[in-house]
Image: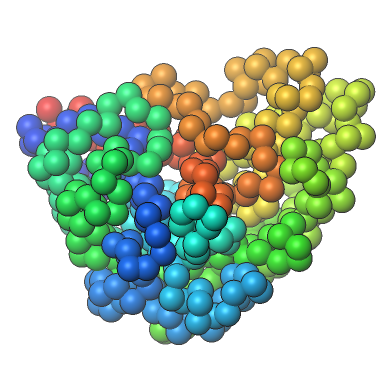
Amino acid sequence: MKILLSVALSLVLSAPAFAVWDLNDVSYLMPLPAKVGPDNLLGLEAPGKGGPLLPPKFLDTIPILTVTHTQDQIVETLRVLGMRIDPCFPLPTPQSCQRQLRLVWQPIEEGRFKAQTVDAALHSFYVLTDDEFVSLLKDLAAWKKKFNVNTTGMPLQVHPAWVGAGDSSPAFADFSVIIKKYAGQGNLTRVTAMVLRGAGDMWGFQGFEVRNGRLQFIKVPRTDKAAQAFVNRAVPADHFEQGMIAPEPVGEDTINKIIVNSSRLETGNEELIRKEVRAAYRIENPHVFNPENMDCVNCHVAQMTREWVTRKRSDIGINDLWQSFGYQNPRYNMSNVTPILGHTQNLRAFGYFIENVAISQRVINESAEVADTINQYFSSNK
């Protein structure tokens, strides 16, 4: 399948219109609207390929995203806040992979001064044929050229095409048309969910495959269970307290000590801490792990665990661990613009934590890999 994709890509990537693909050319973070409804962000029932982008009936199978909102409120306020493309998602196997477009959804609500998000999310997956993926790349390149968008050398961020005008931008309107052309009920294959529980200090993760028009549970990797939860009751959220992962994953490269009670690890325990920082870097490295062989919680807590060690344990030599185990790619700006990296209750991978941009290093690293793949096809067919 990779060979077929290579041939298909070569037919378009040799065209002069294609410039170098950068991080913001493969992962697109939408703007928050100025206020909640009416807005121009895409909702569940926006008409897409073969039906709505995400049929609201599917939410009857997914646990309610947050108990502070009714299901009707969630259905009404869920919005697309991110889009990512992937030429080789590791399904059904890493050797035989899928072309995908993926959408990130979060409910939005009125904050004190502006719109903000609820701390919960859905992630919907849409499979594309080789020809469809090539057509998507052509459309994205044409859109970028039409609006004279520059992404070169920029870190992953709210997309520069709509900075300023936000969801009222003509570029945003045209981009939404592209999403609806390639994503919808007709090619929706998977939905994953992160729900908020407790006093805002417990998060649950589940995944579902679309089979015969219905959602069916899939098991969380490394757990043999259909759901996984994380708890952190720290106040303020700059450390870990009464933390827990349930069920705990089985295997090496597991973070399960620092997140329990970090105050006990502010001195000593050097080997334990190094082991978990090493695990965090490997979890974030797409050359080592992918969504099919890493559990949900470890993937989402890796960054905040590293950040706590960076702030509290400078004696650990975290840079040496990064040099040995971290993902490195000098072709892109790999810096993280998330303003609250040290917040130990920010589990967001790509979207917003309340009103703040929230991007995980794992997503940045994956975006670099996707950009590399597309650029390599381009370079080999000049």
State the residue in front, 239 or 256: 239
Q: Is the residue 262 above or below the residue 128 in the image?
A: above
Which of the 4 image quarters holds residue 128? bottom left
- From the top left corner, tell me how far across and down residue 220 is, in percent: 64, 62
Residue 125 relative to residue 277: left or right = left
Q: How is the image coloured?
A: rainbow
Which residue ends up furthest to the left in the rendered image? 16
**367, above or below 300, in the image:** above
Indicate the position of residue 157 as horizontal and vertical percent values. 40, 38
Q: Position of residue 252 (x, y in %)?
A: 74, 41
- In the image, taking residue 43 as reference, residue 295 lies left or right, namely right
Residue at far front of view: 113
> Which residue is at 92% across, 34% downward?
264
Q: Is residue 102 left or right of residue 380?
A: right
Closer to the camera in the image, 371 or 61:
61
Instruction: Find residue 163 and report its image quarter.
Output: top left
Quick check: 174 left or right of 44? left
Q: Position of residue 273 (x, y in %)?
A: 81, 29
In percent of the image, x 50 and y 77: which residue is there? 73
155 or 67, which lies in front?
67
Numbered marks: total: 0
Q: Quadrant of residue 224?
A: bottom right
274 relative to 50, above or below: above
Q: Is residue 165 above or below residue 332?
A: below
Q: Measuring 42% from the left and 84% from the top, which residue is drawn there?
A: 212
**Quadrant placement of the C terminus:** top left
Residue at 88% over, 35% down = 263
Q: Is residue 320 visible?
A: yes
Query: Can residue 104 be seen by looking at this rendering?
Result: no
